[in-house]
Amino acid sequence: MADLLESMSVHEIDSFIADCQQILAILPLSDPRRIPYLLFLASRKLLRHTQSNQKEDLDKSIFHSIELIFVPHLWLEYKSLIFPAVLILANALLARSIVSNQPEDAIFATKYLRHLRDQPHATLGFPRHAVTTLFLSALAFLVKLEDSNVVQNIEEMTVLFHELLTENASEGDVTLFSTLLAEFFFSYSHLWTLDQPLTQVIECLRLAKMLKPELRRIHLNLAFCLCARYLMTLVNDDYEEAASIVDELIASSSPGDIQDELVAKVREFVATLAVLRPMLHPTPEYSEEAMYRARATVSSNPVGHHFRPWLNDCWESIAEDRFGYFGPIEGYEASPMILQPLPVAYYESEHGAELCRIFDDIDLLGELLSGIRNNDITNIDEALELGRTKLTSSFPIHLLMSKLFESFGDMLFEAFRRTKNIEYLNESISTRRQILGRPSPQFLRFGSIRKLSATLLARFLYFPSYCTQDLDEATELLSQCANDRHANLPSRFFFACSWSSISRLTRHPSISTAYETAVSLMQYTPLFAPTLQLQHATLANTDTDYHRLPLDYASYQVDLRQLEEAIVTLERGRALLWSEMRHLRTSIDQLQQAHPQLAHKFAAVNRDLEELTKSIPPSHKLSVDDGATDDARAVDPFGRFLLKQRSLLKERDNLITQIQALPGFQSFLTSPSFDTLRSAASSGPVVIINHSKWRSDILILFHDASPSLISTPHDFYDRATTLKDKLLNSRNKYGLDSPHYDETLAFVLAELYKLVGKSVIDRFHQLDVPEQSRIWWCPTSVFCSFPLHAMGPIPSDDGEMRYFLDLYICSYTPTLSALIQSRDRDSGSRSLDRPSLLLVAQPDPTIPTVGSEIKVVRSLDTEVTSLLSEAATPATVIDGFRNHRFVHFACHGTLEAGKPFEAGFELYGGDRLTLLEIVRSDLPTAEFAFLSACHTAEVTEGSIVDEGLHLAAAVQYCGFRSVVGTMWAMADVDGRDLAKQFYKALFSTSEGEQGIPYYERSAKSLRFAVKKLRRKKPMTLERWVNFVHYGA
C-alpha cells in the first residue's frame, strides 16, 4: 500500500481526495463508514504535501487524523485502523513542525510515537521499524532545534538506533541516522561535554560497523564521534581508533575513490585533530604524528584547496616545536608555538561565525588585560564592566566560553595586583570557579585549575584570615594538576614542584605527598627524550630549583627524623641518567630461571633501547623524506628514531608490569630499599652531605647500624654556596696555577674543615671509626665540586700540617648504587693475580713528560700492552678494555661546555674517545682505571652536578670497579710522579696487602702517592689536591 501511495501522481492524489470528500459529504457524522475515508483523506493530504509543499494539506491531514482518532464509538467496527491513524498524525505533526521550525508539533508527535511503541507488534498493522524510523526523525529534529531535553533526546535516539540495527533495517536508514547522531556532536559544539550520550552513540556506531562493515559512512561517522570524545576527554585511545579507521578507509580505497568527498572530509578532520593534539597534550611523539598527518593531507589535496595553507603553516609551526624539546634545530630560530587560525571556509559557516564572535571577544578582553597590566587603563572599573558585558552577551553554552571567563578572571587578578583591592581578587576567584563549574573539555580545565590555585594562594598570602580554606583548596588543585594523566610529564612535574614548595613554605599537611609525587615524576623525566644527550638537555633546561627537589625532600624527612627514608630519597632523585642506564643492564638471572620466555623478551627490548639511547640521533633539522616503506607516523629519520624509542619504552613498561606480577618479583626495577642501599657501607662508612636551602645535614651511613645525623649550623647552606662561588671565580679569573687561586683554595679547604671536616672526624671518634680506615664521600649540590678529602689543615699537637686524607683513606661515589655495583659485578673477576694493564698514551709537545710516564708504566712488574700514538684509536682502546683488567691513560682530557657526553680523551690525530663511547661498553672483568688526564672527574660547565656526568663516572659505569681521576687540569709532570708512587704502593708485597684484590688497594695507594707528591718542593696546593679516587 505504501509503495502504491508513493507512486501516485499529484493528479491521481487530487482525484482521490475529491472522491473521499464527496463520500464524506454524503455520510452522516455518526456513520462508522466515515472512518476509512477519513484515514484515506488524511494520508493523501500528507502525501500531497510531500509533493507540493502546501501547508494547508498538513493542517487538513492533522485535522482529519484527530477527527477519526477522537471519536471512540466509531472504532468498534474499524479499530484496526487506529494505529495507522496515529502514525499518520505523528508524521503530519512532525512535517508541520519542520515547516514552522518550531518544536511543539514534534513534541506531540513523539508522545504519539511512544504510545505506538508500547503496543504489541502484532496489533500495529504495519512494520515496527516504521515507528522507529519516524521516532528517530522526530527526536533528531528536536535535537537540531536544541530543545530543552537535548541530552534525553539523544539518549533515546541511541536506544532506537540500536533497535533499528537489530531489526535488519535498510542500509539507507542505518546510514541516515548514524550520520545524524554523529553530526550532532559537530554541529553543536557545546554537546561535546555530553559524555554519556556520546559514549552511547559510539557504542551503537561500533555495533553498526560490525553488523554492516560494507557501509563506509558508518566508519566515518564513528571516526567523527571518537574525535569528538577525544576533544572532550583527551583519552588517546579515541584518537588512535579514529585515525586507524581513516587509515583503513584510505588503504582500502581504489585510486579513483581516494578523493571521495567523505573520506577527504574526515581525513582533514583527523589531520586537524592531529595538529591540535600536541597543543593540547604536548609530547614529542604527538608533534611527529601531527607533521606526518598534516603533510599527508596536504599532499592528497589539490593545489588551491582551502586546507592546504593552514596545514602548511601548522606543519612548520609544529616542526619548530622540536626546538623546545630537543634544543636548537638547524634552520629554525626558537619561537613559541602559535595556534594557527582555522581555514576561512570554516568561518563562513554558521558555527564559524559564532566562533569568530567569541574569538573577537577574547581578543578584546586580552587587550583590556594588557592595558590594566601595563597601566595604560586608568579606569579599571570601566574596563571590568565591559568585560562583564561580554560575558553576558556571548553564547552562554559554547565550548570556548570557558576561555572568555578565563580572560576575564585574568583581568580581575591584574586589577587586584595593581590596587590590592580584595573585591577584585574575590571576583577573580568566583569567575575561575565558574569556569570549573561549566562544561568544558579537559585541556581547558587544566589551565583553569592552575590559575584558580594561584589566585587562592594570593588571597591566602595577602589576607590569611579571610578564608582559612584557601590554602587547602589551592594545594588540592595543584595536586589534581600533578596527577592529571592527560597533561604531559614536564607540566605535571612543574605542578608537583609548585605543590611541594608551597606546602613546605606553609607547613601544609600535604608536604610528604607533594614531595613524593614530585620525586616519582622526576624519575621519569629523562625518558621524555630519546638519547642520553637529549635527556641531559631536557634535565639541564629545567629550573635549578627542580634539580634540588630530592635534596629538599630529604631535608624534610630529616626534619621528621626519617633518616633512612631521606637516604632513599637522595638515591631516587640524583644521577637519574646513570640510574636509567643501569636499569637497561639489570641482571635477569633470577628471571631467566623463573620465566625464560619473559626474560628473553625483556633482555631483547633492553638491548634495543640501550643501543638507541646511547646512539647519536639523526639531525634535528626537519628533512622530509618519502619514508614510503616505513610504517612509523613520521616525516623524517629523527621522527622515526623518536617513535621507535617511544614504542620500545611502551613495550618495556608492559613487560615490567608482567614481571612484577610474578611471585617474588614485586620489587623488580623499583627504587632500591634502604636495606639494599646500606650495603654500600660494607667496607666503610659513607658520608652523605645534603645541601638544601631548607636545612642542610650530614648523614653517615653504616652497614650494620642506624644512620648517624650531624646537624649543621643555620648558615651552612649559604656558607657552602659562597665558598663554591669564591673558588670558581678565582679559578676563572686568575687560573689554576696562580698564587691567588692557591690562596683561595687554601681558604676554602680551611673553611670546609670548619664546616664539615671537624664534625665528621668528631663523630667518627664517637662511633669508634678507626683512623686510617676507608670512608666514602657521597656529596650533593655544590659539595660535588669540593675536594673534601683535602679539608684542613687539621690542628695537631706536633705542629705537622695534616689534612683529612691523612686520617682516613677517602674515596668518592656519585650515588650509593654506583658503589654497590662496583662491588657486585661478576664475583668471578675478584682475582688476586697481578692484572694485565692497558697503557693508552699520546706523547705531545704540550705534555712533554708523558714519555717519562710511559716508561714508569712499562717498567711495572706486570703484563703491559701499549697503545701509543696512531695505535690508539677509539676502537682499539675500547677493544683493549675488554682484554685487560687495568687501564692507564696518559693524554689530554677535554671538556665541552654544556655537552658532558662529548668530554673525552684526546687520541692520535685529534681523534677522541668520548664519554658517550665509553658508556656504550660493558666490561664485566674490568677492575681499575688510572685517568692521568685533565678534568676526568670534573663535571662539565652547564651540566647538572648531581648527575655526576664525568669521565671517571663513565669509566666506572662501564665496568671498572675503581677509578683515579682529576678534579681539574693537572700538571704534566705530576702524572709521572704520581704514577710511580701509586704503582709502587699498589704492587707492594707487604704482608698487610696480602689477600686483597689489587683494585681494592687503589684508594690507599693513591693516598700514599699523593702524600709523596705533597712533600715535593716546590708544590702548590691545587696540584696534589687534584687527584681523587672513585669506587670500590
Image (tube, rainbow, N blue to C red):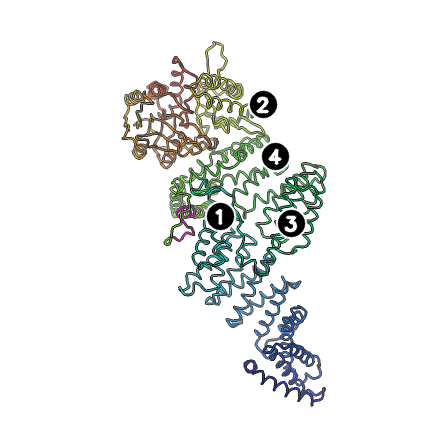
Mark 4 or mark 3, which has the lower sequence index?
Answer: 3
Residue lying farthest top?
A: 798
Span shown in magenta: 630-643
Identify the element where label 3 is drawn.
helix
Which image quarter is the C terminus in?
Answer: top left
Mark 4 or mark 1, which has the lower sequence index?
Answer: 1
The magenta stretch spans residue 653: no
- The amino acid beneath tag 4 is Arg
Identified at 69% across, 90% down, the residue is: 26
* Residue, disc 1: 317
Query: Residue 809's quadrant in the figure?
Result: top left
| Mark 1 crowd level (few <14, some 14–19, many ≥20, 10 Å Cα) | many
Q: CA distance from mark 2 to mark 4?
A: 20 Å
Marks 1 and 2: in contact by CB < 8 Å?
no
* Residue, disc 3: 405
- The amino acid beneath tag 3 is Phe
- The amino acid beneath tag 1 is Ser
Marks 3 and 2: in contact by CB < 8 Å?
no
Q: CA distance from mark 4 to mark 3?
A: 32 Å
Q: CA distance from mark 2 to mark 3?
A: 50 Å
The magenta stretch spans residue 635: yes
Nearest the eye: 616 or 929: 616
* Residue, disc 2: 713
Identified at 49% across, 12% down, the residue is: 796
| Mark 4 crowd level (few <14, some 14–19, many ≥20, 10 Å Cα) | many
| Mark 3 crowd level (few <14, some 14–19, many ≥20, 10 Å Cα) | many
* Residue, disc 4: 504
